[in-house]
Image (tube, rainbow, N blue to C red):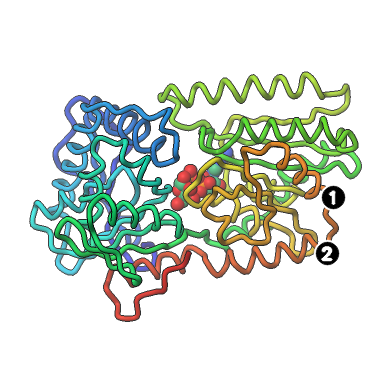
Amino acid sequence: MRDSGGLWFGWSGETSEEPPEKPKVFRTGKVTYGLIDLKTDDFEAYYGGFSNRTLWPLFHYRLDLASFEHHWYAAYRKVNQRFAEALLPLLRDGDIIWIHDYQLIPMATELRRLGVNARIGFFLHIPFPTPEIFLTLPWHRQLATDLATYDVVGFQTGTDLREFSLYIEHELNGTVQRDGTMRAVGRTFHAGTYPIGIDVDDVVSMSRSVEARKQAEKVRATLPGDRMLMIGVDRLDYTKGLIERLRAYEMLLKDYPSQRRQVVLMQISAPSREDVPEYLEIRQQVELMSGHLNGVYSESDWVPLRYINRSHSRRVLTGFFRMSRVGLVTPLRDGMNLVAEEYVAAQDPDDPGVLVLSRFAGCARILEGALIVNPYDVYHVADTLHAALSMPQAERKDRWERMMQSTRRNDINVWRDRFLADLRGDDDRSDNAS
Ligand code: ADQ
């Protein structure tokens, strides 16, 4: 948007008892921002409730954590309607509209109801679950109808698209063509895969910046001799597989005593959604597990785990990525996972590290030079960590080059251009990646 201009519309981050009807509108460079405040109660039920305690766990296959509260769903619909009404006066002829993520699925329905004829696309940043899971949602049919109301629906991977297609065919008696054209509930729309990527050059240059180097040197100074660093960076979320990761690390230290004192794991977990009880719980579990691990394995001059429950600037993170011999990205389920790609892009081409990557992260389809693991199988993850720490430089380089090439081939610009070409209805519709 910085290049092409346009309107970015969304929540302001503010809530109040009586928010103003009209959005705040201001311009920075070529981008106009339209922001609305939400009513406190609506926000809690819409965001903390339906978005983060119903859709988020369900779409990540955590049926056990999903709650189905009717008043949350009512608030979800109401807030989407409110967004649509506030957006309407800001729209101009010829606009195309790109809606992002699971908090906003009903937007096309609401905009069409208000008479908007523009092309409207939707991109789902998280996985789409298998129909058997989706069907547990009491409002699955409404949400699927909302999706069918878009002109283009984008998913991260071929698996997400396949699950959605199965639902369309078997639950809605719709049809799915090979080119992604779908017909269901009286509507025709296009669905495809658009794996999101990163701004590769930006990450490369950040990782070489003075600040990144300075911070990395500070960490290096705390690692005597050839002691190696492994790094994990995630939002503190139960989907990211942190407990399983720590168990695998413990297994490594237990089964490979030669790695003790040779390795340090730095786990940086940014606090996230702290008003949702399940997030408090995962935080407590990680703290307990970290204390246990360091208590059992630390020695007077070596602590195996540095657990940091704070966000860091992206620049500093790239410095940490670059100096880490192993990057651990082991979510139990993840739409794409951009940390994996950032880790790859930040590496030193002459001495790159190794990426250990969950098969359940969308980016595992793209990063075939990574060591792919099943994060639930902590024994295998431990063996893989040992292999990663012992990998000769030539193999590390070979794997990294392949990962870097595919990170570039699937970068953020390719993602944007492919989605927008399909949304505009350009004739040479991009091929569906898988
Ligand atoms: P997230 O679940 O937030 O995103 P991810 O893609 O891994 O997951 O990370 C997004 C960004 O947050 C990255 O740029 C990362 O560097 C940053 N970040 C993570 N931990 C951090 C920390 N401790 N400190 C500072 N920054 C941190 C959702 C989906 C993903 C999908 C993205 C994009 O869940 O599957 O890849 O959207 O579509």
Q: What kind of element bears circle 1?
A: helix
Residue at the bottom extreme?
A: 427
Residue drawn at (83%, 54%), measured in percent from left and top? Answer: 391
Q: Quadrant of the N terminus?
A: bottom left
Q: Which residue is mark 1?
A: 390
Residue 345 position by quadrant: bottom right
- Disc 1 residue type? Ser
User: Which amino acid type is marked by label 2?
Assistant: Ala
- Where residue 166 sits: x, y (%)? 34, 54
Q: Position of residue 226 (x, y in %)?
A: 89, 44
> Left or right of 37: which side holds 244?
right
Q: Is residue 93 visible?
A: yes
The residue that label 2 is drawn on is 394
Q: Is residue 404 left or right of residue 95?
A: right
Q: Secondary structure at mark 2?
A: helix
Q: Residue at x 30, y 33 (%)?
A: 50
